[in-house]
Amino acid sequence: NAGVTQTPKFQVLKTGQSMTLQCAQDMNHEYMSWYRQDPGMGLRLIHYSVGAGITDQGEVPNGYNVSRSTTEDFPLRLLSAAPSQTSVYFCASRPGGESGQPQHFGDGTRLSIL
Amino acid sequence: GIQVEQSPPDLILQEGANSTLRCNFSDSVNNLQWFHQNPWGQLINLFYIPSGTKQNGRLSATTVATERYSLLYISSSQTTDSGVYFCAVEGFTGGGNKLTFGTGTQLKVEL
């Protein structure tokens, strides 16, 4: 049971490039989400999904796209990277159904935009 | 949305000392988690504690939901306890999995 797996762990991009951050979980969790962490701050929610085919915006969604075609995977896409998107990105998942269940986090992707 | 405040923002301890970290939140919650972010940036899930008291070794946590606060106790601190401690909550109106994080307590344990 690997839990929540994020790839890559590190990435450097140039302004304007696009890329996809991968997130996969093997716990059959319905709910998945993406957060970003900036220096000296807690995590902020970018996008989330409550099941395959369903996504919604979080607190800071601009500049990011998501899709959820399977229960296991929830990729985050940067269409045109900007220096302001330099951050550490965390993916999380939790069981669906009743609310109030703990979230499980991946180890993060450290992204630098030059 | 829910506001989460953590105190103190920074804390320096001598090894072996005890400490209490506090998390205040502005509305009723159905999820409260304490995390330790280690020096490598990994988020370690310490407690899932929307109410009540739990203990795990030298760490324990108490959430008083009616008064909207949670406390994390660290006893006999060790240098490996250094890092940032986050409190995160989810309200009943979240409609999904919207954890709101505090800004954390930076803990440094010295020999």
Image (cartoon, rainbow, N blue to C red):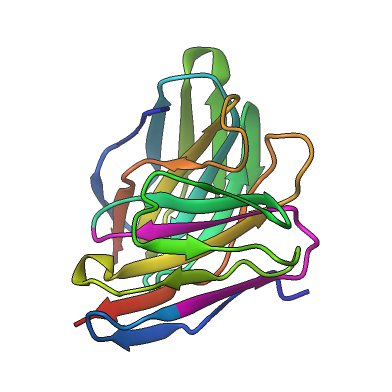
Q: Is residue A31 magenta?
A: yes
Q: In this view, does B81 lie to the left or right of B31?
A: left
Q: Quarter-wise, where is residue A37 in the image?
A: bottom left
Q: In which quarter of the image is the C terminus of chain A?
A: bottom left
Q: In this view, does B62 lie above or below A37?
A: above
Instruction: Specify the farthest residue to the top.
Output: B66
Q: Nearer the viewer, residue A76 or B32?
A: A76
Q: Which residue is drawn at 36% across and 41% down?
A: B102
Q: Position of residue A33 (x, y in %)?
A: 56, 55
Q: Is residue A104 left or right of residue B69?
A: right
Q: Is residue B55 magenta?
A: no
Magenta range: A20-39
Residue A8 visible to an observer of this rendering? yes
Q: Quarter-wise, where is residue B5 in the image?
A: top left
Q: Which residue is drawn at 36% across and 49% down?
A: A60
Q: Position of residue A97 (x, y in %)?
A: 79, 39
Q: Which residue is drawn at 56% across and 68% down?
A: A106
Q: In this view, does B107 lie above or below A68?
A: above
Q: Quadrant of the N terminus of chain A?
A: bottom right
Q: Position of residue A12 (x, y in %)?
A: 30, 87
